[in-house]
Image (cartoon, rainbow, N blue to C red):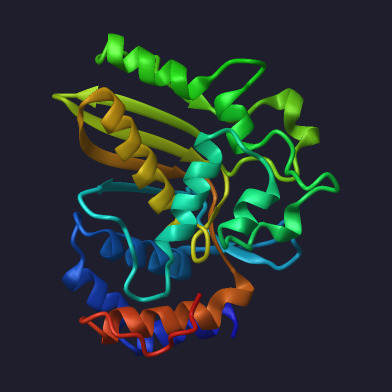
Amino acid sequence: MTHLELREEIEKLGYNEYIQNVYNDTYFEDIYAKSLLDVINNGVESGDRTGTGTIRLETGYRFVFHSEFIPILRGKLINPHNALTEVIWILTGRNDLKFLKDNGVNYWDSWVKEDETFGPIYGTQMRNQNGFDQLLYVIKKLQQSPESRQALISLWHGSDLDKQALPPCHYSYHPLIVNNKLHLHCDQRSSDAFLGVPYDYMLFYFIQKILCFFTDTNPGNIIHNNHDYHIYQNQFDSVLKYFDNYFDNPDGKFIFPNVV
């Protein structure tokens, strides 16, 4: 299926009109479905590192979502266990394949280096960036000064890029406490809208809840800035199946249970 064929099918099925009528700023999947439609309707075709080809939004995409519930989609199969496993993997400072495999997460396999690690990526940067524990710093900073704007975690470390199997996609977390609510600002350089973002959002959700626990605050919004928001061209058929599930099954029943 081509980009043009996908756009024509979406229009024929009336999905653009439907999302405008049911769109709810507080419900994650409505926001997410609208973001995919935005890429389909307004994205431009572009090359990419993998050679697959994408459609991408010129200005990226920004989510603002109140995380009252775990942001699980009803239109495609999403496994919260995988996201929670990645959170534990990152927050404990690990960068090995073994922990992921032992806990049933297999989609990192193709990136692993010869030493069975991924180099100094997410967990290493968060917990041991040149000997500095950024997570502990942020928790202590917010405990001591809840109004602080300096509690920021950056996973982008230029001197380590050539040692990494893949540079971090989501690379900064900036929690801000206002009126005892912890709002989490997240920046992502590259966002696979269909496969990656649903898991990224659950990861942000769990990180926010952990920070709220240690700072004795309530969860506020998650603000997710996607600098390059794209859909791969080999995902078009699956994206259309996702919309069939989302729009035609308000009770969350899966017409296509193998959409992953």
Q: Is residue 113 left or right of residue 93?
A: right
Which residue sits furthest front? 102
Task: Name which residue lies at 40% across and 60% down.
Answer: 80
- Whether residue 110 is visible here, answered yes or no, is yes
In the foreground, 40 or 204: 204
In the rendered image, residue 66, in percent from the top left (x then y), is placed at 22, 47
Q: Spot the residue most to the left.
A: 179
Measured as percent of width and height from the top left, residue 174 is found at 40, 28
Q: Which image quarter holds the N terminus?
A: bottom right
Q: Is residue 41 left or right of residue 20?
A: right
User: Measuring 21% from the left and 65% from the top, which residue is drawn there?
Assistant: 23
**On screen, residue 221 above or below 55:** above
Q: Position of residue 192 (x, y in %)?
A: 55, 58
Up-down: is 63 above or below 247? above
* Residue found at the very far right of the displayed protein: 114
- Residue 185 in which image quadrant: top left
